[in-house]
Every structure is written in structure tokens, then in C-alpha cells.
Image (cartoon, rainbow, N blue to C red):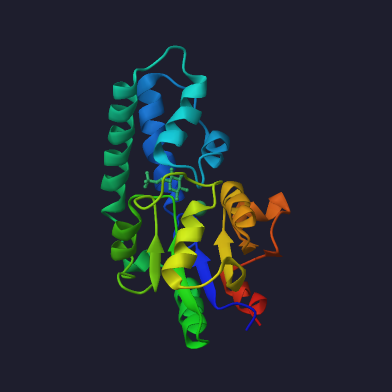
Amino acid sequence: MKYKGIIFDLDGVICHTDKYHYLAWKQLADKLGIYFDEKINNRLRGVSRMDSLEIILENYNGSLTATEKENYSEEKNNIYKRLLEDMSPSDLSKEVKDTLDQLKEDGLKLAIGSSSKNARYILEQLGLEGYFDAISDGNNIEKSKPDPEVFLKACEYLGLSPKECLVVEDAKSGLEAAIEGGMDQAAIGDAVYTQLATYDLATFSDLLKCIR
Ligand code: BG6
Ligand code: MG
């Protein structure tokens, strides 16, 4: 095996919560009269909730106080969490689950490295509570991706060095974080177009080809 551990981004890699992020931000942007589309939404991948709001506000004709920003980001999160309530283990694809199971069988340690503060709730909804060997998420970091902190913490929780770990990401910010942190990276989804990663995955199960 080339690696001892694999660190997975959550939103857009293990599950498709990215569509719920879009819907929740869209609702808030519409309320504030701010232009927001899928292209702008793509820039929010991997970025923290507050930093995402700042990107959305680039198209706002006005200014908000720190308290207003706090309130709006909380409002978005409440909409988002209501959407997450409908998630269930059926939202975890068989391909993803089978691949994860195979990696575990191969003796690899598996971790989550996500900027989200809702990561544990999402894992519960998917029936993956207690499945990963370590979880590093938005609750244990100061700086979000592209800073490598979330992945370095995941390595630390796994008891492995960055060189022993592979990061799986769907976001440019996440690939940059892994590169900066000294880990190899596998890109999936739109992240393959960045041409930044060690490996480009056409589909999740391709991961099995990268580790041997
Ligand atoms: C990342 C998403 O996983 O989590 C971002 O890709 C999101 O779009 C970030 O902004 C923070 O998520 P949350 O759940 O803490 O608002
Ligand atoms: Mg992602």
C-alpha cells in the first residue's frame, strides 16, 4: 500500500450536500436581493460558512455589521439544517460505501477532513456515525481550506504523518490545502479540471487503483 491513511472531504465527496448548501445560500441571497448562481456557489466549496458569506456579499450593494453577518450566516445554517433533516442512509451511494469498506479491509485508516461544523450530524444522517477512525471538521480548526489545518489535524488524530496520507477532494481550496500540508491528493468532480492533484478520479471507486 502506498498510504496508511485516507482523509476524505465530506460535502461533494462522500455525499452531495453541496446542492443543499446552494439552495440555502440562494434563499438568503434572494432575500437580500443579491445575485447568486451555481458559478459563485462553486467558489464556496471547502470554504467556511463565514468566508462563504463574504464571497456572496461581493455582489451586495451595501454593508453589514458583524452582528448582521453572524445573524445571516445563522439563518442560512438553519435553512441548510432543515434540508439535511431529509437525508438518510439511502443518500450514501453503494459505490462510496463499498469502496470505503474495501479500503478498511485493506487496513487503511480512514478520516474525515471537512470545513463543516455540521459534519458529525451529516455522518449520522448517512448512517456513518462511528465509521471513521477520526473526524477533523469545522469545530476543531481556526482557519478553513485552503489552509491545511483541517487535514493536519486529521493526520494527527490518525497518528500518521502527512506523507502517509492521501486526501480526497472535490474543491480547489481543498486540493491547495492538501498540497500545502504535504499530502498527496485525489481529485473528484469539478476538482479534476484544476489539474492540481496527484490523481484524478473519474469515479469514487477509482480510489482503489491509487493506493496500490
Ligand atoms: C464545506 C463546504 O464542506 O463546509 C462549504 O464545501 C461550506 O461549502 C463549509 O461552506 C462549511 O459548512 P457548514 O456546514 O459549517 O456551514
Ligand atoms: Mg467538498
Q: Quadrant of the C terminus?
A: bottom right
- The answer to whether residue 17 is above or below residue 55 is below
Q: Residue furthest top?
A: 62
Q: Residue 111, image x and y in percent?
A: 45, 68
Residue 93, can we see it? no
- The answer to whether residue 58 is above or below residue 169 is above
Q: Residue 171, image x and y in percent?
A: 57, 50
- The answer to whether residue 111 is above or below residue 81 is below
Q: Residue 149, image x and y in percent?
A: 49, 52
Q: Residue at x 50, y 86 (%)?
A: 107
Q: Residue at x 46, y 66 (%)?
A: 156
Decide if residue 67 is on the left or right side of residue 192: left
Residue 36, can we see it? yes
Q: How many marks?
A: 0
Q: Residue 148, image x and y in percent?
A: 54, 52
State the residue in front, 37 or 180: 180
Q: Residue at x 26, y 53 (%)?
A: 85
| Occupied quadrant, residue 38 | top right
State the residue in front, 134 or 116: 134
Q: Residue at x 71, y 54 (%)?
A: 196
Q: Quadrant of the N terminus?
A: bottom right
- The answer to whether residue 80 is above or below residue 11 is above
